Amino acid sequence: MVISAETRAAIDAEIAKYPKRRGALLPALHLVQKQTGWISPETAQELAAIFEIHPIEVMEVVTFYNMFYDRPQGRHHVYVCTNLPCSLRGARDLLKEIEQHLGIESGETTPDGRITLGHEECLGACAWAPMLRIGAQYHENLDVETAKRLLDELK
Amino acid sequence: MKISVDGVEYEVAEGRTILQALDDVGVLMNGVDIPHYCWHPKLSIDGSCRLCQVEVEGVPKLQIACNTPVAEGMKIHTQSERVQSAREGVMELLLLNHPLDCPICDQAGECKLQDYAFEYGQQHARTQEPRRAAKKRVDLGPTIVFDQERCILCRRCVRFCREVPGTGELSVFSRGDRSVIETFPGQPLANDYSMNVADICPVGALTTKDFRFKIRVWFLEDVPGVCTGCANGCNVYLGVANNRVYRYVPRRNDAVNQTWLCDPGRLSYKRIGADDRIDHAALQNADGIPVAVPLEEAIAAAAERIRNVVATKGAGAVGLLVSPHATNEDLFVARRFLDAIGSTQAGFAVVRGRGDDLLIKEEKAPNASGARALGFEDAAGLLSRTRGGAVEALVVMGHDVLAAPYAESRDALERVDTLVLLDTHRSPLESIAHVVVPVRHAAEKEGTLTNFAGRVQRVQPAVEPPFEALSEGEALWQIAQALGLPGFDDPYDVRAVSKALAQSVPAFAGLDLDSVPPDGAPLAGAGD
Amino acid sequence: MQKAPFVTSYLTEHAGDDAFATLAGYRARGGWEAARKALTQMSPDDVVNLVKDAGLQGRGGAGFGTGMKWSFMPKAADKPKYLVCNADESEPGSFKDRLLLERAPHQMLEGIVIGAWATGASKTFVYVRGEYAQPADVLQRAIDECYAEGLLGSDVMGTGFAHDVVVTRGAGAYICGEETGLLESLEGKKGQPRKKPPFPAQYGAFGMPTTVNNVETFSHVPHIVKNGPAWFKGFGTEKSPGTTIFGVSGLVQRPGLYELPLGTRLDEIVFQHAGGPLPGRKVRGVIPGGMSMPILPVSQLDVPMANEFLRERKTMLGTGGVMVIDDSVCMVRVACVVTYFFRDESCGQCTQCREGTGWLHKIVQRIERGAGSREDIDILLDVCGKMEGQTICAFADAAAWPVQGLLRHFREDFEAHVEHGKCPFPQSFEL
């Protein structure tokens, strides 16, 4: 079993909120990823059993959404918004600096498994560009040095 | 309610969409051309290919005919300039990333993309970028190969697996122009109906391993027929070339098989040209070894042996074990043979197997219902009487009697004085039969079959066996002639037999060969 | 994020106060009184009519009449009815709902309870975009407070009316902001918009009658109930009453949020409120309503920000996300960013959208590289025409409009690229 008893209990609590079981699939995927980092085929099968659907229906959902992962990820997700408002204010230069700093390209994970770097579409921080998010945490009005320091602090 | 399409009025049912309504009245793509990819009459509505857009008077935007409900007095235009231009738009976008490999694509000739591109496409591609490269020859499972590059994402296959067999092996992963059909790791496309996805795939993305690259489809003649794999009697087209059947594809019959065919049934075409066909008549020699003889000799020998049994044991010692693979006409001849000779010893054996709620029936023969309708009972009684010594000459059609429920039958068959075997395929029965007569497969003769629900459907010769063979009916007819039985004076004529059947057996009234419609008709009293 | 808009009005006047996000703080400012009034003194029809009279238009982008939308909900109580609050704010250039969720969650919840009373809904699902994890937490805390104080649950304010609110987080897909894409996602599926009919008011979330409204839309409702339609119409234009929160981003002195009456002129927003261009730069063009809306050149910014005026200039208010582009920026590069976005976010169902968004992006990239031709520019417009108005949802339109807008007003940038084989704006941001 991949899904822990604790995660399973949290999933069941989510299921209770919806008129149909499957309504809790997205919340469940968030919960499971919090525990495991990504959705493996084995995890998908466990979720499929919980939600009484085919495993492939779990995977089609996983592959549709940006925030679900069908392969292992770094310990931290770092996303730079590169949509227009951020691009107008230097986001792409920031992303290049970060790529150099980490020695990886957007979409890759550092060899030590510490950071998966990506660029993302608009994150709703347009007036405070450039910005990045580390997991759930937004960091706005960034300059390159601050951004590098934030990344260096990640364990 | 009434709708008008391109100025022609149609009476259609309420609650249907435009495409459904036109399909109901039989004019879709048969008078009213509304090209479509994602819509399929037997699947849920998807509404995504956008090719079926039509103009509805009073509605500013074009509407998709697949999902727009009909309304009283609705006026629809399917060929206006706006509609044509929308179709061209869809076609150009669909062809944008589609490989231009028709010459090496096995779908060529039955490809809806090719057809519609010809009709609505532009002469020259305006794209300069390389087309999307994707996986070729993906093994989806035991029966199907997938070409991602050719896929136009109509999702018919995805909906089929979810909605028909309910197995749901296929899905679209990812999104946008990265969307791709996938299976789950370790769960290949493997269900009893998997090969239907190749039929409904409008392009060459899904092809069956069985038919792939066997022959170009334009060389095939599609002969309507019936699958003989079980009692369901699914309607098929037999794809024929060079006197060979290359495949079965489903022939739509909403009363029988919708638009589907099960995989075992579909592959049962292989039985027609199989290596184990009985391809010559044989007589058992003094050492008990079958020796090939001309067909006439086998018929004469069968008659001679039966005559002897009648002479020594009486007519009541002659029995007929008929086959549910034989046609109604064959079985009617068998019935008349018994009546003429004056015996009541009869029965039929049928192999049983796994069935489901969809198409697959437990009885693995196409005409057990016909046998019942003609008064034949299960073989158990006949076999027990044979074992008890009441039957000394037994004409056996087929070898279903070797199957499990009749397992103890063999000693009964071994003890008779005369065993005449009329069969299509080789079996251990040959070694105990005194006379063997090769017979025709349902794809090699005229006749009708009665499916599990009592629907009488026609078969016709799609190929000619490459050896001398008779239908079971004709074989019995010739034996009857040799015996001099009354009522068998004329040369065998299946049409005459069929007419006599329709006239003398009330259940078959009006169901002679030439009166059975292409989609069959129920036995009188069978309902529909 | 700023705590409150630089200019505030009724929606955001207390947003700067941290306590406003708590039940106590919200009540101290008169919060939840409008809901009490609606549930105790007004019939559901009264509420619907009041909102109709006020002329409140949805603030999620389409601008459909809120009262009208509520009136589409079936009256019969034979099956559960649902409200959905669309908090999937993902339109590039839009960030107002984030502020309302984080700084004024009770205001929105109060609007939801009033809407639920008006439509007979037993449950509201607030669908928050996946990246807004923190706003979702703030909202959940506010909901918990409401349950504890009897403002939600089986007996709202002792009236016997029952209502539950559930927060569902998305997972990163722009299309889930489309109302039926949202419903699919809410049901645990891919967020692919549904074909219509049926419409959500008949067959919505989990197959039940459903109305979907945006965060800001709900947030206006308590004020309308409290102050009446005449008061509400005192803001904005005759056809577009009320305020909205404009999000100004891009190359201006003071990017940020501004709550202003609808009908405020775009040049006033850009040059006065947001302080105009950066030193030494000039404004070239402004996208007035989030990325889906066609751009306006600097010569056309003298337009009141309300749909009846913006339509005349072939653009729309959208979500009020004002993106300012200055004279350092090449519009071909803007087109690259725009077409990349729509290609990335297309759900992939409809042919024109799936294939068209990809093709637009490829052609624009080719022009950007200097490898395009004049014919390519025409093909761009032709492809836009093939995408527009022909798909299940409006995403394909939203992908076509900005390209059409850029070519309508800045065709010279594209022509310079194809003629000289390079970008005429050396200072433009790099891709």
Image (cartoon, coloured by chain):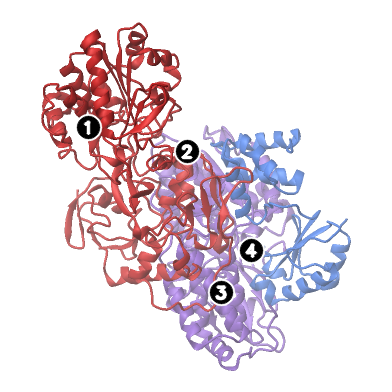
Chain colours: A blue, B red, C purple
Amino acid type of the residue tagged 4 in the rendering: Phe
Residue B474 is marked as: 1
Amino acid type of the residue tagged 3 in the rendering: Pro
Chain letter for mark 4: C
Of badges 4 and 1, the one in the foreground is: 1
Residue B332 is marked as: none
Q: Is residue B254 visible?
A: no
How would you rate the neighbour count of disc 4 (Cα within 10 Å): few for under 14, some for 14-19, many for 20 or more? many
Which of the pair C148/A20 is nearer the observer? A20
- Residue farthest along the bottom direction in this orientation: C420
Amino acid type of the residue tagged 1 in the rendering: Glu
Q: CA distance from mark 3 to mark 4?
A: 38 Å
Q: CA distance from mark 4 to mark 1?
A: 85 Å
> How many numbered tags mark residues here?
4
Which of the pair C268/A56 is nearer the observer? A56
Q: CA distance from mark 4 to mark 2?
A: 52 Å
Residue at numbered disc 2: B192
Residue at numbered disc 3: B130
Residue at numbered disc 4: C95
Of badges 1 and 2, the one in the foreground is: 1
Q: CA distance from mark 1 to mark 2?
A: 36 Å
- Quarter of the picture holding the C terminus of chain B: top left
